[in-house]
Image (spheres, rainbow, N blue to C red):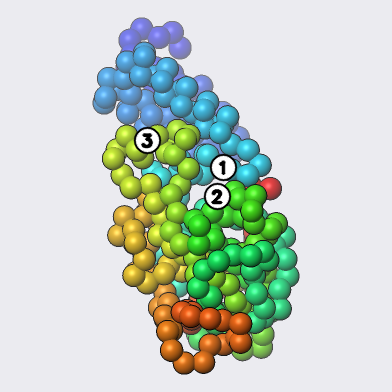
């Protein structure tokens, strides 16, 4: 098709793509072209603006490495990650425990840890946290032998792969639920943290005069054959930035009841001063089991 006006471009591209063999891939590609062409027309995109946008996409690639995924971060800060998550885990998914975005810091092969053990693998100052968790199916029955990955940022607001002062896999662990669907662990109370703002994702957030912060939370990934893999987070009740999470990940179901203790007998003899406890129940639904692609190595 020979192009005569701007109105000929979109139909020409659609015609060129129509022989793509996979119907679903063709549907996605065609919709993407229609929408991005319509966007360019709506804002009357200039050549200079187009060049800037292409340059930003190129920079997303250059900012991505084995320890950081700028593409996922950009998707998170635009709300796209949460939108896709909720579309796929909303009315047709678990209602008692909402799913949440994976985030850019999950690592595969976290150290297997006995239930009740500590995931603090190097000196990490902060109030002790004792978490008691349970995994149930949608009928309320325990789910035994479920594999649960746990990871979170330190009280300084950094994951271990970002911080040379932390040991490898600090504040990460892999647990297996018992016959009652239970597991527990000791850690330290996580803190909120800012996303990296030196790359294009952070630049967009700062330009929009948004707070670049995530509220304090724990990450969980629950996996067992026969059940849909649940990726979720449990946010610290009362934490700062709960109502303005930079990646739009906070839902009501994900705010946990972290109890603060200043008196009484702590769960471990070495605990001095304030400590915290968390009791939380996850619900998983039948479905396809699988693990996501790790955003970092």
Q: Secondary structure at mark 3?
A: helix
Q: Which residue is mark 3?
A: 204
CA neighbours of label 2 inside 10 A, class few (<14), some (14 to 19), many (20+): some
Q: Is residue 183 left or right of residue 83?
A: right
Please say if 110 is above or below 213: below
Query: Which residue is at the far bottom?
Result: 264
- Dividing the picture into quadrants, the one containing residue 69 is top right
Q: Secondary structure at mark 1?
A: loop
Quadrant that contains the N terminus: top left
Q: Secondary structure at mark 2?
A: loop
Q: Residue at x 34, y 38 (%)?
A: 206
Percent across and percent down for residue 27 are: 48, 38
Percent across and percent down for residue 34 are: 38, 30
Q: Nearer the viewer, residue 93 or 79?
A: 79
Q: Which residue is mark 2?
A: 104
Q: Nearer the viewer, residue 56 or 226?
A: 56
Give how far apart the Cα atoms at labels 2 and 3 are: 18 Å
Q: Are marks 1 and 2 in contact (CB under 8 Å)?
A: yes
Give how far apart the Cα atoms at labels 1 and 2 are: 6 Å
Which mark is drawn over residue 69?
Answer: 1
Q: Residue at x 58, y 72 (%)?
A: 187
């Amino acid at each position: 098709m020979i192009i005569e006006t701007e109105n000929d471009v979109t139909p020409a591209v659609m015609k060129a793509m129509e022989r793509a063999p996979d119907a679903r891939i063709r549907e996605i590609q065609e919709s993407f072209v229609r929408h991005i062409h319509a966007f360019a027309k709506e804002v009357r995109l200039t050549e200079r603006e187009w060049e800037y946008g292409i340059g930003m996409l190129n920079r997303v690639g250059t900012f991505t490495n084995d320890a950081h995924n700028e593409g996922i971060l950009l998707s998170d800060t635009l709300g796209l990650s949460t939108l896709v998550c909720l579309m796929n885990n909303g009315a047709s998914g678990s209602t008692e425990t909402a799913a949440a975005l994976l985030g850019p810091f999950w690592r595969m092969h976290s150290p297997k840890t006995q239930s009740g053990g500590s995931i603090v693998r190097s000196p990490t100052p902060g109030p002790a946290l004792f978490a008691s968790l349970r995994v149930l199916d949608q009928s309320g029955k325990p789910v035994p032998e479920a594999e649960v990955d746990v990871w979170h940022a330190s009280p300084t607001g950094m994951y271990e792969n970002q911080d040379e002062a932390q040991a490898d896999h600090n504040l990460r662990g892999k647990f297996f639920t018992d016959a009652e669907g239970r597991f527990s662990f000791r850690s330290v109370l996580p803190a909120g943290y800012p996303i990296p703002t030196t790359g294009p994702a952070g630049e967009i957030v700062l330009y929009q005069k948004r707070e670049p912060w995530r509220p304090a939370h724990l990450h969980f990934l629950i996996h067992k054959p026969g059940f849909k893999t649940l990726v979720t987070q449990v946010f610290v009740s009362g934490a700062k930035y709960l109502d303005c999470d930079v990646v739009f990940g906070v839902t009501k179901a994900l705010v946990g009841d972290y109890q603060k203790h200043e008196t009484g007998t702590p769960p471990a003899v070495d605990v001095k001063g304030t400590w915290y406890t968390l009791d939380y129940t996850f619900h998983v639904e039948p479905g396809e089991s699988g693990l996501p692609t790790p955003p970092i190595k």
